[in-house]
Every structure is written in C-alpha cells, then in structure tokens.
Image: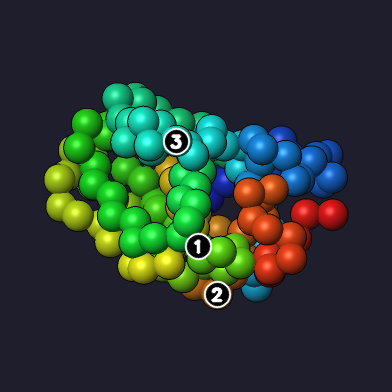
Amino acid sequence: MIRTLFTLFVVCTAGAAQATCREDVVELVGEFGQARFTVDLADEPEERSRGLMHVPSMPSGQGMLFIYDPPQRAVFWMKNTLIPLDMIFADVTGTITHIHENAIPMDETNIDGGPGVFAVLEINGGLSEAIGISVGDAMKHPSFNSEVAALPCE
C-alpha cells in the first residue's frame, strides 16, 4: 500500500518540478532520485513541542519540518502522536545523518537523532524505506544556508 501511495504522490507532483525552495516544500535527493514533500514548518519551541500530536492522518506527500537553529541534539517521542512516522535527521548542510523508521504511535521512548541536528523531516511511517531514502542523501529547503548547503537554493 505504501508503494501505491508514493506512486500517487509522484504522479501528483510530476508537473511541479520547479516548485522547490519554498518554505512549504522539502526536496530530498539521493541515489533513489528525488522526492518532494509539502510541509508545515516547526521552527519555534511551541511548534516543535506540539509537532504532529493529535493528527489522525497525513497524506503521503505531506510532512512536518522541524528547524533547530543553532544545531543541537534533537530527541523526539511519540506521546499523543496517532500515526506512525519516519523521522529524517539532517545536519546544517542538509545531509541526512540518521533515519528513524516507523516510530510507534503513542510510544514515549526517546528517539535520539544525535548531536548537530539542524532539521528533522517527519513523514508517514515506512515511506523512507519505500522511497529508498538513506543516510548521506541530501535535503533541500530555504532554511539551509546556501553557503554551506549540500543542495543550495538558487
């Protein structure tokens, strides 16, 4: 079913090839190719604390992008989160440093992304594996400083 959802997402966004470098879009690029997600931005402490709590469902092409400026150790949990999530952690260059797949809804176990986290993309659980997203792939978003970004906005 996840592959079907992702296929629909690719078809729906095929005409939006130039729709990157917007606050509401994250692009991931790696050996798998590229994937785009429409995101809500969580860059304030209250927004990061609330995250996707109490959200009953999320379309496959959507997610939430957490920004930590300055970069820091980012630790998540799934308290009051109703859907399984993949958490994709990136450093200040946008390079993916860690992926936590299929975080369990309502679980209060800490999910540690490690030190130096600048951004975390949360997407539906299982999508990172279905797409083929890996550590070392790159994330593109205007929040990454273009002077150091692996995929700078133009």
Mark 3 is surrounded, within 10 Å at the Cα level, by few (under 14), some (14 to 19) or many (20 or more) other residues, namely few
Q: Residue tagged by mark 1?
A: 90
How far from the left and from the top, in percent, is residue 131? 55, 58
Mark 2 is surrounded, within 10 Å at the Cα level, by few (under 14), some (14 to 19) or many (20 or more) other residues, namely some
Q: What is the C-alpha distance between the residues marked 1 and 3?
A: 18 Å
Q: Residue tagged by mark 3?
A: 44
Foreground residue, 144 or 64? 144
**Residue depth check, mark 2 versus mark 1: number of the one nearer the observer:** 1
Foreground residue, 130 or 117? 117
Extreme-front residue of the structure: 70
Q: What is the C-alpha distance between the residues marked 2 and 1?
A: 9 Å
How far from the left and from the top, in percent, is residue 59? 51, 32
Q: Is residue 68 above or below residue 72?
A: above
Mark 1 is surrounded, within 10 Å at the Cα level, by few (under 14), some (14 to 19) or many (20 or more) other residues, namely many
Can you say which quadrant of the picture contains the C terminus? Answer: bottom right
Q: Which amino acid does label 3 sit on?
A: Glu
Instruction: Check residue 136 in the rendering and tell me which mark sits there, or answer none.
Output: 2
The answer to whether mark 2 and mark 1 are in CB contact below 8 A is no
**Residue 32 in view, yes or no:** no
How far from the left and from the top, in percent, is residue 22? 72, 39
